[in-house]
Image: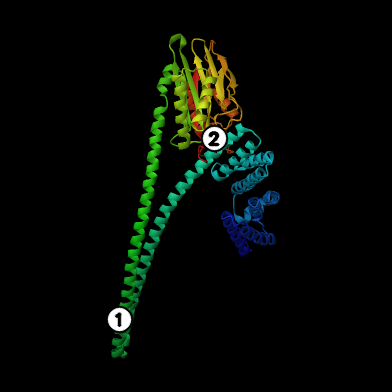
Amino acid sequence: MKDTSAIVIFLNSKGLLASDSKQYEQSMQYYTEALKLEKAGEKQIMLATLFNNIGMVQNSLGKHDQALEYLFKSVETAHKLKDKRRKIMRTYKVSKEHFEKNFAFGVGNTYINIGTVYKNKKTYNKSIEYSNKGLEMMPNKRVFYQFQKVYNTLSQAHEGLNKTDLAFKYYKLYIGARDSLSSRNYERRLNKVVSIHTAEKKEKELAALRREADITKQRNRAINTALGGGLFLMLSLAGLMYKRYDDKRKSHNVLAEQNHEITAQNHEISAQRDQIAEKSEKLEFAYQNITDSIEYAQRIQEALLPSQEAIRKALPESMIMLKPRDKVSGDFYWFTQTGENETQKTVLAAVDCTGHGVPGAFMSMAGDAYLNQIVKQQGVTKPNEILFKLHKNIRQSLKQETTGNRDGMDISLVTIDHAQKTVNFAGAKNPLLYIQSGKLHLVKGDKHSIGGEQREDERSFTNHQISIDTDESTSFYLFSDGFQDQFGGSEGKKYMVSQFRDLLLSIHHLPMHTQKEHMEKAFSDWLGTDYEQLDDVLVMGFKV
């Protein structure tokens, strides 16, 4: 039975390799043979995996109905195995937690595959249903390949239903997962080269030591032979002298030949070591160049951001929590003041650009430049007009009318009119949250982004006005989606907007710098030690 299980695993691996090489007919042959063996066995642990793999080959061949038949068989088989989990846990000596995680990953991955097939069939609602099922079952945040795949499927399915706002949302998540996977693949390749270098070096050293040990062993054998021959000398001195001479001559010949081989191999080891060292040096040099470039971009981005001291001078009760996922960020904040005395206005914005890391940072620099042009140079202060002009500038600069480029940004922007005691707000996807007289209010932004796909003739944004002519100060919050979309906690779920609202409502009465400390602790506790930050995080708060 063990031999049969090993053969099934081997055939499944061959099928995967053939499928990766687009040799789908060959892949089906391996899977079919493995399926026959597995069905004939007693345990049938690999059945669900084989059904899933066959389903994806059928999908690649354009046979979508057959693909769905096998994929649903995979889910059904996995649930039957779960009913036998106690027996499986005893047989394979695995914990309940380990079994549950593997079950969730396997079934979740199959649901994601079902979503992919339905998307290919243009059955978009079914695609969204099963993709979300798979996404909910993924056991942790480290499966970036599955996240990249399901977010891409969800983006295309929503686009097929003309739901451009959701399509763009999942496209952003797809870009983020893709960047994370690329980053980890680069680190993995670098570590692999270093590991190969170390392993090969140790292997050559061990081989040389083994040969030296063999030579020493042969020398000791010759000596023992000579000592043992002392007894034989008493019987036949002439024969012993000849024997000793002959053995010594042969031993010297063997040693000379082996020393020659060792010398040649040492030269080969030295040459290979030099080649590996040279490759490692080139990789380290390339990695250092990339790191230096990113650090330079980080300094540029930090220089473009307004100083928090300047913001606190204009708004003493204010705070900014900015936690980039990488060294550079796709989230950024913006601030300026216009006019003086009676006409003075304060403009603040929290911006979330497509992607994170270096791609997001480039978009943030473009957004910063256009906001400076629109507000500081052209004198526009009404939030909805600022967003209208920003959208046109991004579309034109990225030539989105002709190139199909879908990059853009989500933004919440406010203008504080100190004389009129009002706060005006406009948002592209992102909302404004404020707490006045102990009551929480959420003002939603418009359902389209700055930049990206535009199907309407002219994109417009809504202006909202809030009075701050009250006895008590009002707390305002602008934020990106990084905080509430973060996976974590004991169950590995998203933080969610509702929990974020409850957090703000519980701390809004505190000074802003103390609120920031509470937010940072809540975010850190949610991550714990098992989860990594998935996106840039930005929260701006102020009281007026």
Q: Amino acid at mark 2?
A: Thr
| Residue 381 vertical position relative to residue 37 in the rendered view, above or below | above
Q: Residues within 10 Å of mark 2 (few under 14, many from 20)?
A: few
Q: Position of residue 458 (x, y in %)?
A: 59, 25
Q: Position of residue 282 (x, y in %)?
A: 37, 50
Residue situated in front as seen by the camera: 114 or 525? 114
Q: Residue 41: tell me if it is visible.
A: no
| Residue 272 vertical position relative to residue 385 in the rendered view, above or below | below
Q: Residue 126: tell me if it is visible.
A: yes
**Dot 1 corresponds to which residue?**
249
The Cα–Cα distance between marks 2 and 1, rounded to whole angstroms, is 86 Å
Q: Position of residue 459 (x, y in %)?
A: 58, 25
- In this view, the mark in front (2 or 1): 2
Mark count: 2
The residue sitting at the front extreme is 402
Residue situated in front as seen by the camera: 455 or 386? 455
Which colour style is shown? rainbow
Say which element carries label 1.
helix
Q: Is residue 406 left or right of residue 216?
A: right
Q: Amino acid at mark 1?
A: Arg
Q: Quadrant of the N terminus?
A: bottom right
Residue at position x 35%, y 58% from top?
273
Q: Position of residue 292 (x, y in %)?
A: 37, 39
| Residue 428 vertical position relative to residue 203 in the rendered view, above or below | above
Say which element carries label 2.
helix
Residue 47's quadrant in the figure?
Answer: bottom right
Residue 268: assigned label: none
**Dot 2 corresponds to which residue?**
402
Residue situated in front as seen by the camera: 368 or 178? 368
Residue at position x 52%, y 17% from top?
382
Q: Residues within 10 Å of mark 1 (few under 14, many from 20)?
A: few
